[in-house]
Amino acid sequence: MQQLLSGFSDILNFQTILVMCLAITGGIVVGTLPGLSSVMAISLMLPIAYGFGPVIGLSMLGAIYTAALYGGANSAILLNTPGTPSSLPTAFDGFPLTKKGKADRALYAALFASVIGGLFGTFILIAAFEPLANLSLKFGPPEFFGLACLGLCAVAAISEGQVLRGLLSAFIGLLLSLVGQDPVSGDVRFTFGIYPLISGIEIIPALLGLFSLSQAMNILELKSSHIAHYRAEPGVLALIARRIGVAWFTLLRSSIIGSIVGILPGAGGAIASIISYNEARRSSKDPSQFGHGAIEGVLASEAANNAQVSSSLVPMMGLGIPGNVNAAVIMGALMSFGIQPGMGLLTNSSDIAYAFMASLIVANILLLGIGIYMVKLTARVLLIPNTYLGPSVIALCIVGAYAASYDIYGVWVMFGMGVLGFAMLKLKIPIGPMALGLVLGPIAEKGLGQSLQMAESETSLIHFAMSRPISLGLFALCVFTLFGAIYVERKTRHAKAFAKGIDND
Amino acid sequence: MTLKKLYRLLIYLGILSITIGIIDRFTGNNAPEQIYPGKSITIIVPFKPGGGSDRIARAVNAFTEEVFGREFIFQYKTGGGGHLGVGYLAQSRADGYTVATYNTPDLALGPLTGAAQYELNDLRIIGQIAFDPNVFAAQADTPYADMKGFLDDARKRPGKLRLGIAQPKGGTHLATLAMLHQESIDVSVVLFAGGSELATAVLGEQVDVGISGLAPFLGSIDRVRFLGVAGKLKHPRIPNTKTMNEQGIPMNSGTGRVFLAPTGISETRLEILRKGLSAICANESFITEMQTSGNDPIWTDGKRIEAELAAFSERATLMIEKYEM
């Protein structure tokens, strides 16, 4: 505690706060623009971070990471194009809200949820990063397979009302995720002789194409002049603040899910946010609203993905093993400052470690302030006529796809997926499940492949499966999720029938 | 300025830029040797920024100004386990202004397993700045004192023990399979994408023993017992761990960090690059910098590495067929 307070005193000076404010503003912009990612921003700012020294440099990188993950919600809500895979579920309810003219509600909700999730995740990091790092070790390949399956079940569950189409979409995503190298054996498949496909359908160009490009094509086709009608509502801030108070349990649960999934190296924010979204939907009084503009959906998704920011630093700080690319880059920065993350971190470099963690708390608080101001600016994107917005988004997609894959092939992937996404829009097949299939496929496949390899040393596969309680628990949750989906569908049907005054039994 | 004049100005600027570009393209190689490198050299890093290769390249970059007059320009080309970036280098102009960093023996393995699109003789090796021998590691509570103990137990219980290997179809994978075959050992092999994943699996006891470089274990070194070093010499960071050779099990496996240039580069320029990089490698500050991230720099000239890789390729072709990789 003492060390944490001294960490705060290292942070709370004019220079650091100023740098963090600039970092947050930049991070929000980076997250909002489709095609730019937090990894890009952090990597670009690395040389500057080195110049600033460990305390300010790390605070800056942490602030960018936090703000960029929040920023992804903006484009998800306004343009139906998630800035990162973890903001995918935010688009499910955020964009319908925009279409109804309530974009600012969704934007403020995303902001508050992100800050609350981020603070929760950071407290968890500070309080328990060594025990949590140990917990993350208990997750092996069978558990990752279980987790990925849970994510896929959640995807199926949220396609309520159009289950077949949702599943079709998810399976197309899974199929596309097979392109490239087998994650376990290294065998190359489905590249059809096109060498760059050896790295598979890269996720950022694919998302850009599926969501951004298809959306740009869609809005150019529409006769309407703008994406949605927007007029700033007075009192929205207070309204949302009240809704937050009411939805405190959703936020808590989502933050917990985000924090736990975040500590698992390689799990990713998308799993956290989709599971959290599905749980919120399952326990909501009116699940049918989800997918059509339920604020709780936005809250659940955003709280989870920002809680995951701090907890993704747990394996890196506790074991010296980065859990995702952002953590890897930050770890690179730490090591360049001569700090070895891992077990010795708190003994050898506790002042810098605690200053960094304190800076994450401060970053979230600053995010709230700067975010409230920027929401008004970001919402004005909706005032741009489609004739300018469409081509701008297409240009950003091309730049983003190139920047993400460091190669022109990423742009072709983006175009290909864009055409596919547009076709799916026309056929009324939801694209969300496909994107999730694309993200979760490799995790599931790697988990299954490695589990089968591990099982060879056991007497039988069943015997092996039974010896892994966490994995069994996750599969039980899968079954629970699927039954829960059926239950929700019944509940909705009864609610609708009741509303019509007809008894369906 | 009228719109028409503005358009005309833009067109003139466009033509000017294209002309400069064309001139630059055709004069690069004609610049006199004495002033090489007259402009910045681009280094292709085939992995994501912030990773091990990037950090090493950045460490070298801190000294390039002293030696070459200018810093490198970094270009990242990820994909295919790094082979994509190397393939890109192989197709670049061989004027000495594009180099890349990558690892051996994956450099030689890629063309043989189909993971790479280039051939080994599309590239010239400037030199190797560090060699990181692989290590066998187990969780600290392991019953084994060394690899010999593990292998003896594996003989008694064929197929019952798990050995984790980092990077499928990589140099470590091949070398480990060869060792297991040579010793007639039957273990269940589990493949992991990279060192970080493997280290997590070892720490979490998902496997009994794992093999990878030392770096991913640095953050949790007190929770790990090292059972053997797979290189010719002991690892300076874990001096108490015997080498595999010392335990009676011949094995030489590790990752060499090399710098590459495309074939066709003039010998003069290649020599300048070699001299420059070897000077950096001998620099005290560079050595200290590298050691903070767990690397121990020793310069090996490219000619020798090229010869070693050619020999390796021959052996590897046979092994790949045998193990159906």
Image (tube, coloured by chain):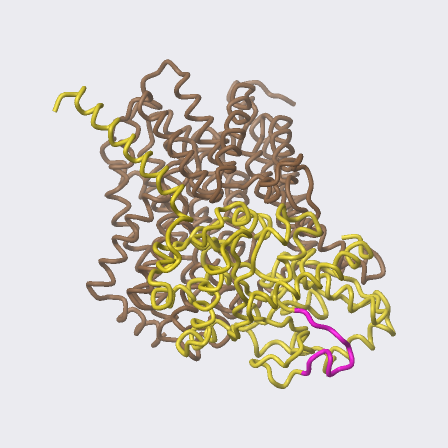
Chain colours: A brown, B yellow
A311 and B75: which is toward the camera: B75
Estimate the x, y position of residue A150 in percent, counting from the top left: 62, 45
Q: In this view, does A327 lie to the left or right of B14?
A: right
> Magenta residues?
B242-253
Tally of numbered tags: 0
Residue extending furthest toward the top? A223
In the rendered view, tell whether residue A498 sits above or below residue B309: above
Q: Is residue A308 visible?
A: no
Q: Is residue B220 left or right of residue A119?
A: right
Residue at 36 percent of width and 74 percent of height? A1
Q: In which quarter of the image is residue B39?
A: bottom left
In the rendered view, tell whether residue A481 sits above or below residue A418: below
Q: Is residue B279 left or right of residue A12?
A: right
B194 and B55: which is toward the camera: B55
Q: Name the quadrant of the N terminus of chain B.
A: top left
Estimate the x, y position of residue B208 in percent, counting from the top left: 72, 70
Residue extending furthest toward the left? B1
Is residue A59 inside the magenta stretch? no
Main secondary-structure element of the magenta-colored stretch: loop
Q: Is residue A227 left or right of residue A186?
A: left
Estimate the x, y position of residue A182 in percent, counting from the top left: 68, 47
Is residue B250 inside the magenta stretch? yes
Q: Can residue B259 be seen in this view?
A: yes
Q: Quadrant of residue A168?
A: top right
B143 and A190: which is toward the camera: A190
Residue at 47 percent of width and 44 percent of height? A406
Residue extending furthest toward the bottom? B240
Estimate the x, y position of residue B166 in percent, counting from the top left: 65, 61
Residue at 69 percent of width and 78 percent of height? B227
